[in-house]
Image (cartoon, coloured by chain):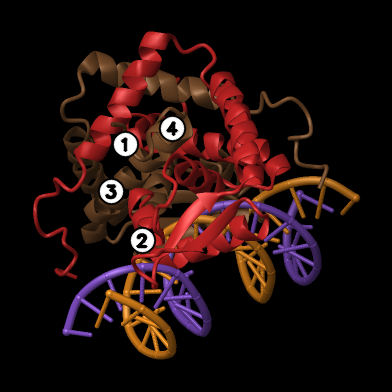
Chain colours: A brown, B red, C purple, D orange
Amino acid sequence: MSAPDATLSSFMGYDMKRAFNVIQNDLNVTLQPFGLRMVTFSVLVVIRDNPGLKQTQLAEILSIERPNMVLVLDDLEQMGAVVRGRSPDDRRAHELTVTLKGRRLCDRAIDAVRRHDARLAAGISDAARRSLHAALRQIQMNAGTQDDHNTVSGT
Amino acid sequence: MSAPDATLSSFMGYDMKRAFNVIQNDLNVTLQPFGLRMVTFSVLVVIRDNPGLKQTQLAEILSIERPNMVLVLDDLEQMGAVVRGRSPDDRRAHELTVTLKGRRLCDRAIDAVRRHDARLAAGISDAARRSLHAALRQIQMNAGTQDDHNTVSGT
DNA sequence: TATTGTTATACTCTATAACTATA
DNA sequence: TATAGTTATAGAGTATAACAATA
């Protein structure tokens, strides 16, 4: 007697989607008290770690489209966590930095996410956790290996 | 010198999201020639493996809301892969089955997805693959362990 | 009264084209 | 002309309320 989704369970994408949905829902609950979502959290952390970053660079790092990044930054700027400063070299560009408030928020949110990660990874050995991390990285590296007609273009 | 997203990379959710995006985009390209998306593929497979299933049961199995399942089934029925039959016991319910055409489509799509999986899992040992599978399952089981104030409410 | 499938709807995420101001 | 940030918009995916037919 097998589960009704036994065939699907043999595919990486299926279990990955289900696991990610779990993580995402759970993480959003964790971040809600901070007024953050997964995206705003990620953006906040990257700006804190790379002060002076331009919006285009930030979008590139996180694989977010520029127009969508604008809204995320509006959000973070409105809550006083991030500042869009003018660049001295290029008056088109913004140099992004976190405020003191933003830094504190970032620190507290990171602590919460660490605890969240530990809870969801309960029962997984350290070795298995490293293996998971390595596997997820490898999958990202294997992307774009598709034969041909994939490179979009051929609508 | 560390990557600009080094801090984020230490969180499961981040690498999981990036890996899943890769799989999803790639998989949709793989399924496009069959006229299938990830959802329609999953639904097709589960119906084939569980003939006579009702829509509500199917929705439950795949964690899809009933109203959304209706549209997925419209799609599969329109392409002649699935039939909504009348149930003899309950005239409200539909008994779902795949047509011959649907079965052939399912077989070919599964082969394609198997090859797709193998390509994305290239460079990951069998042991690591089993470990990945187990870890993803464990994460799903650990969900809903959140303390309290999470149940929304406390705006 | 409860349940099955359905409709309508809304909200989030994501993706693209086109504008503006600078370069 | 090209680029940075922006605006508007369109398309998925997902979630909820309410209805008709049936139980």
Q: CA distance from mark 4 to mark 3?
A: 29 Å
Find disc 4 in the rendering and name its residue.
A7
Task: For label 4, count other residues whose C-alpha is less than 10 Å away and answer few (under 14), some (14-19) or many (20+).
Answer: some
Of B70 and B150, nearer the camera is B70
Residue A123 image-quadrant placement: top left
Residue A3: mark: 1
Chain letter of the residue beneath label 3 in the structure image: A
Instruction: Answer left or right for A67 relative to B9.
Output: right
Residue A27: mark: 3
Q: Nearer the viewer, mark 3 or mark 1?
A: 1
Q: Nearer the viewer, mark 4 or mark 3?
A: 4
Q: Amino acid at mark 2?
A: Thr
Q: The C terminus of chain B is located in which quarter?
A: bottom left
Task: For label 3, count other residues whose C-alpha is less than 10 Å away and answer few (under 14), some (14-19) or many (20+).
Answer: many
**Residue A110: x, y in percent?**
25, 42
Instruction: Answer left or right for B123 relative to A128.
Output: right
Q: CA distance from mark 2 to mark 4?
A: 20 Å
Residue B54 image-quadrant placement: bottom left
Residue B77: mark: none
Q: CA distance from mark 2 to mark 1?
A: 17 Å
